[in-house]
Amino acid sequence: MNAREFGDQTCARLRDAGHMAYLVGGCVRDILLKREPEDYDITTDATPDEVEALFPFTIDVGARFGVMIVMEDRSDPDAAQVEVATFRSDTSYSDGRHPDAVVYSKTPQEDVARRDFTINALLIDPANGEVLDFVGGRDDLRDGIIRAIGEPERRFEEDKLRMLRAVRFAARFGYAIEPRTFSAIKRLAPGIHQVSAERVRDELSKILTEGHARRGFELLDETGLLVEVLPEIAKMKGVEQPAQFHPEGDVWTHTLMMLDGLGAGVPSTLAWGVLLHDVGKPPTFAPPSGPNGRIRFDRHVEVGVKMAEEIGRRFRFSNEDVDQISALVMNHMRFKDVPRMKPATLKRFARLNRFDEHLELHRLDCLSSHRNLDHYDAMNRFLAETSPEQVAPERFLTGRDLIEMGFRPGPQFKEILNAAEDAQLNGVIPDRDAAQRFVVEHYGMPTAEGMPSK
C-alpha cells in the first residue's frame, strides 16, 4: 500500500485500541496545498510502549522523546512507514534542540502548541477527513504566511534550526515571514552556531535544491543568518566585477542569478558548486591599476578551491561530496579553453567525475553574466559526436606492459603512461605496438636499473 493508505491504517489501528490518532504536520500542509507529501507523521496519545505493543514492525528512533517509526514490513526497504509521536507538552530546551524532559499530554491542542509554525501544526482525522486547526494554520496557508506558534523567540530558543526552517519554508512556498517571527530571527541569528554543523548543512542543502534557492539566500541575508552560517558568501556583496564580462553586477548578484537557475531536485553537489564557484573572488579582488587596467581576481580559482574544501569540512560533508564540490570550483573556468584544447585534453576534461554537473554550472555561469554559450555549445557538440569509447578508450599501455618492457615502477612511471595515453587520445599512435615504440622513442630503453635511458 502507499504511504497515505498506511498512515490512515495506522491511525485506524490506534483508534481501535482506544487512542486518539491524527495525521499531523507537513503532510497535512501539503495535502491542503494539493502537493504530494514526502512522508507522513502521526500524533497520538498512545505512549511509545503502547505503540510498540500494537504494531509488529517498529523502530525506536526517539522513544525517550515520544517518537517511534511504524513500518508495514521490516524486511522490505520500500515498504511504507510512518512516524508516530506521542502528544507532548511544552518544556524547556537547555541545549537548543532537545527538551530537558518529556512531558506527555492528553490533548492534540497541547501537542500542536509546542510545534514550530502554524502551517505545520494542522491535523487531519483520517476517520472523517476533518481538519483540526488550533493555531490559525489554515488562515496562514491561505494568506501565505510563515508564523511561529505562540512566542517566536521561545520557539526558536527551543530549537535554533527553526530559524533556517522558517527561511526554507518561506522560499519554498513563496510566503512572507510574519513580522514578529522575522524580528525574532534577526535577534537570535547568532544563536544558530548552537546547532550542529550537519543539521545546518542539511537545511542549507534543502534551501539550495528545492527550486527557490535565490529567494532562500536573499532571506538568509535579510534575516542576518547568512553572515552567521556562510560569512564567505556574505562577503560577495559589493565586490565589483569587470563590466565587459559581468554586466549583471557584483559577485553577490551574479551568484544569486545562478541560484535562480537551479531547478527543484538538482544534485546537492551541483547546487553547492554553484554557490561556491566564485567564493575565492572577494579575498583576491584587485581594483583597476593604470589607465587601461581592469578589476582582477588573480588565482581566485585556487583560493576558492581551498575555501570550498574548508567549508565542506566545516559542514562535515562526505569526502566524496567535498571532492566533487571542490572539482566544480576548480574547473569552472576551463570551459573558456575548450576551442583551443588538444583532443587528449578535451577528452580528459570530459572524463571528469559527473561531468554533467560541470557542464550545467558553466551554462548557468554564462547565462548569469555575458550570456555567450559558444563554449557550452562546442562542448555539447563534442560530446554528441564522440562516443564514450573514444572519450575513455582502453589504454594501449598499462603499468604491466611497462614492467614487461623492463621498466621498474618509479617516479617517471606515471609520466610515461600519461604521455603514451595522450598520444593515443590525440591519434598519434594507433595501437599497442606503436605505443611501445613511442615510449622507446621518447624515453629510451630501460637501463639495468629499470630506469629510462633518456
Image (cartoon, rainbow, N blue to C red):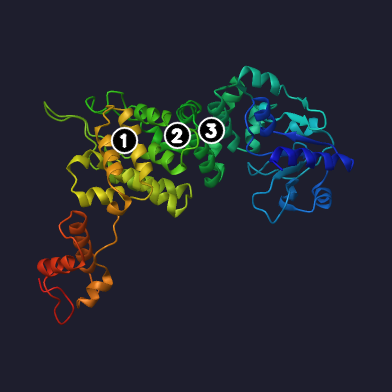
- Residue 231 position, x and y percent, is 42, 37
Foreground of the two, 282 or 387: 387
- Residue 62 position, x and y percent, is 71, 49
Q: Earlier in the sequence, mark 1 or mark 2?
A: 2
**Secondary-structure class at tag 1:** helix
- Residue 198 position, x and y percent, is 53, 47
Task: Please tell me how crowded label 2 is: few (under 14), some (14-19), or many (20+) other residues with Cα within 10 Å.
Answer: some
Q: Residue at x 58, y 33 (%)?
A: 165
Q: Which residue is label 2 attached to? A: 227
Q: Amino acid at mark 2?
A: Val
Left or right: 388 as drawn, with respect to 74: left
- Residue 319 position, x and y percent, is 44, 54
Foreground of the two, 84 or 290: 84
**Secondary-structure class at tag 3:** helix
Q: Are marks 1 and 2 in contact (CB under 8 Å)?
A: no
Task: Please tell me how crowded label 3 is: few (under 14), some (14-19), or many (20+) other residues with Cα within 10 Å.
Answer: many
Q: Which residue is label 1 attached to? A: 282
Mark 1 to mark 2 CA distance (whole Å): 14 Å
Label tally = 3
Q: Quadrant of residue 383?
A: top left
Mark 3 to mark 2 CA distance (whole Å): 9 Å
Q: Quadrant of residue 184?
A: top right
Q: Residue furthest right?
A: 18
Task: Please tell me how crowded label 1 is: few (under 14), some (14-19), or many (20+) other residues with Cα within 10 Å.
Answer: many
Mark 1 to mark 3 CA distance (whole Å): 23 Å
Q: Residue at x 15, y 30 (%)?
A: 289
Q: Amino acid at mark 1?
A: Pro
Instruction: Please give the label number shown on residue 189.
Output: 3
